[in-house]
Image: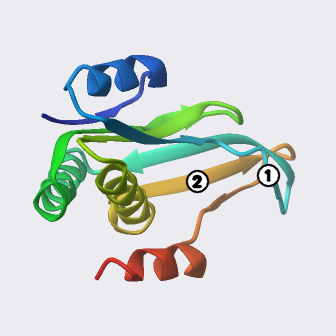
Amino acid sequence: MISVRVQPEPFDPGAELVALETLGGGAVASFTGIVRGEEGPGGGLVELLLEHHPGMTAKAMEAIAADAARRWPLLGIVLVHRIGAMTPGERIVFVGTASRHRAAALEACAFLIDWLKTGAPFWKRARFADGTSQWVEARAEDDAAASRWV
């Protein structure tokens, strides 16, 4: 089972985990990303806006999920990524994997989130308390983490 969703609505990580647990494996691994209230040039972050190309984003996410399914013996994958405006503390991304054994579930989960951080076609704009905004640039640390899967 592979489920890939790009949506503006909030998601429930607990419900996503239950769906993976019902697949009958011995391991479920997950990552939930949350919008940080980080400091920026204009004070604290008040909004993170995620934009995407609808056809391109879903296809790219489906392709990487299929790649993970080829690399590891998985029973299920759930990828949920939000788009639109979000505030600090809101959930932005969920990655879940199910397998018969923990190593496959954990490794595939790490692979998927590393790829989502670097290869998924999303554009982020941060808006700060003073009204200024800026596009969020890619981070070298994220590229380095993703490079281990090449």
Q: Residues within 10 Å of mark 2 (few under 14, many from 20)?
A: some
Q: Quadrant of residue 19?
A: top left
Q: Quadrant of the N terminus?
A: top left
Query: In this orientation, which residue lies closer to the viewer: 139 or 69?
Result: 69
Numbered disc in front, either 2 or 1: 1
Query: Disc number at residue 38?
Result: 1
Q: Quadrant of the C terminus?
A: bottom left
Where is 66 relative to 17, above or below? below
Amino acid of disc 2: Arg
Residue 63 as seen in the image, left or right of residue 57: left
* Residue 26 position within the rendered picture, expressed as x and y whole percent measured from the top left: 30, 35
Residue 39 as seen in the image, left or right of residue 77: right
The residue under the point 78% across, 44% down is: 37
The residue under the point 29% across, 47% down is: 101
The residue under the point 46% across, 25% down is: 13
**Secondary structure category for the residue under label 1:** loop
- Residue 93 seen in render: yes
Q: Residues within 10 Å of mark 1 (few under 14, many from 20)?
A: few
Colour mapping? rainbow
Q: Can you identify the residue that label 2 sits on?
A: 125
The residue under the point 84% across, 43% down is: 129
**Secondary structure category for the residue under label 2:** strand
How far apart, in angstroms, are the residues tagged by discs 2 and 1? 13 Å
User: Which is more N-terminal, label 1 or label 2?
Assistant: 1
* Residue 145 position within the rendered picture, expressed as x and y whole percent measured from the top left: 49, 75
Where is 109 relative to 147, above or below? above
Q: Quadrant of residue 78?
A: top left
Query: In this orientation, which residue lies closer to the viewer: 75 or 68?
Result: 75
- Residue 80 seen in render: no
* Residue 94 position within the rendered picture, expressed as x and y whole percent measured from the top left: 43, 38
Asked if the residues shown at circle 2 and circle 1 are in contact, with their CB atoms under 8 angstroms apart, the answer is no
Amino acid of disc 1: Glu
